[in-house]
Image (cartoon, rainbow, N blue to C red):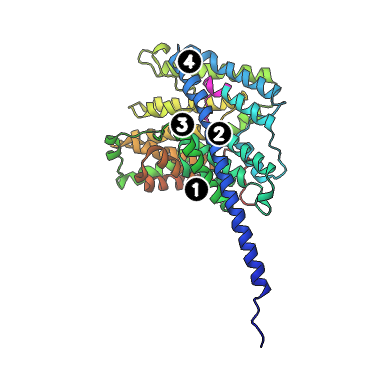
Amino acid sequence: MLKPQRPLTLDIRTEELRVLAHRSREVVVLAAITGAVTGLFVRLFDYIVAERSFETLLESDWKWGLIAPPAGLAVAALLLHTIGGGTNAGTSDEYIRAFHDADYPIRWRALVARIMAAVATLGTGGAMGLEGPSMYSGSAFGALLQRRLPAPFRGTDYRTLMVAGAAAGVAAIFKAPATGAIFALEVPYRDQIARKMLLPALVASASGYLTFVALSSTRPIFLITEVERTASLFQYTDLLGAVLIGLGCAVGARLFAKLIRRAKAFTVKPVLIRLAIAGTLVSTLHFITRVVTSDSWNPANGESLSIGSGYHVIGWLFEEHALWLLAIIFVIRMCSTAATLAGGGVGGVFVPLVVGGAIVGRGVGEAFNTADPQLYTLLGMAAFLGAGYRVPLAAIMFVAETTGQPGFIVPALFATVTADLVMGPVSITAYQRTSD
């Protein structure tokens, strides 16, 4: 009597599934480790730059704002030339380049130089965000770890831990785990998302977020009071306002993208010329800002809105201001970020995009005579960010997580989709692709 035999193909497939499950567990564990290390590093970076250096600058005499940013650019240039061996100032762009090019080198020397230059740039008031260095450092940690541990990753995409680290860096610095995962997967492309690395990105984002908040707090970056929370329930007329915000943000983001590209092109100029022009422009913009935001046109009574990443600008927007002043601050903020970048400063443009959108949204709210200008400010943040980086999903999630306001998602969709459609193929970075 013949015994039924098990098909050989079934045995092979079962073994393949067993190996795949084992490798997936190892990937998840290593992604969690990458996230935790990144979260710890980003917390230290945030403490040194934001809580110590820049806060000290804001609390000092306003005239230090004329001196510190140009000095920070000079120190950053020196660090990139000496320690970095002439490496460029890119952070987020470096992640996108490495994502698309398996042979693009990620070196410890460049990582150390860029992070030190970022501390010099941002700690002295450079008008850029902390998210660029945070994202870059996380992606570098992940890529270097994966390169040294090849065994668990046979058959695994070379970008797995690099994406996980990038997600953890964004999640930590914004205290927004979903935003970190979505942004890291969405930003390499203009019209799609890298789905294959979703699980490691989510695990690393959660790990990085938990490590960061364990050493700080879970308080959202943009805290909305209970009174404002009640007022933020949108009306149907606000949907029209959202479309107008989307149009305004698309126009603003296109102009800002062109400005940033010209600033990046300017970095090839001789270093002394570059630092002299950029430093003078940053100091001049700081002085103008102090004058126009004062009651008596006395710079000593004004606001230091042109320096720093821009979180304090969003707090300033929650007060009532004339449309002409909002327009001036918008132009100054965009020019200050471009000047910092042109001078070779190291930082991100994620937060500058958010700040630009907040100003546009607040301006539309004032012109629209809305009863809830805070809502319009938040819609502008999502639309401008989504259009500038071509990351509509991450933009909506970012504002929802960092404000604790999920109820604004419907009008944010109107604003962000409108901005993305009007934006066309333009992006703030030249390294994005439309497809693999």
Q: In the image, which is nearer the foreground, mark 2 or mark 4?
A: 2
85 is higher (above) or lower (below) than 13: above
Mark 4 crowdedness (10 Å alpha carbons): few <14, some 14-19, many ≥20: many
**What residue is shown at x 68% (from left), y 53% (from top)?**
154
SS category of the residue bearing label 1: helix
- Front: mark 3 or 1: 3
Relative to residue 314, is residue 16 depicted above or below?
below
Which is more N-terminal, label 1 or label 3? 3
* Label 3 Cα neighbours within 10 Å, binned few <14 / some 14-19 / many ≥20: few
Q: Position of residue 352 (x, y in %)?
A: 50, 31
Earlier sequence position, callout 2 versus callout 4 = 2
Q: Earlier in the sequence, mark 3 or mark 2?
A: 2
- Magenta region, residue range: 120-132
Reading the image, the residue beneath label 3 is 215
Q: CA distance from mark 4 to mark 1?
A: 37 Å
Count of residue discs:
4
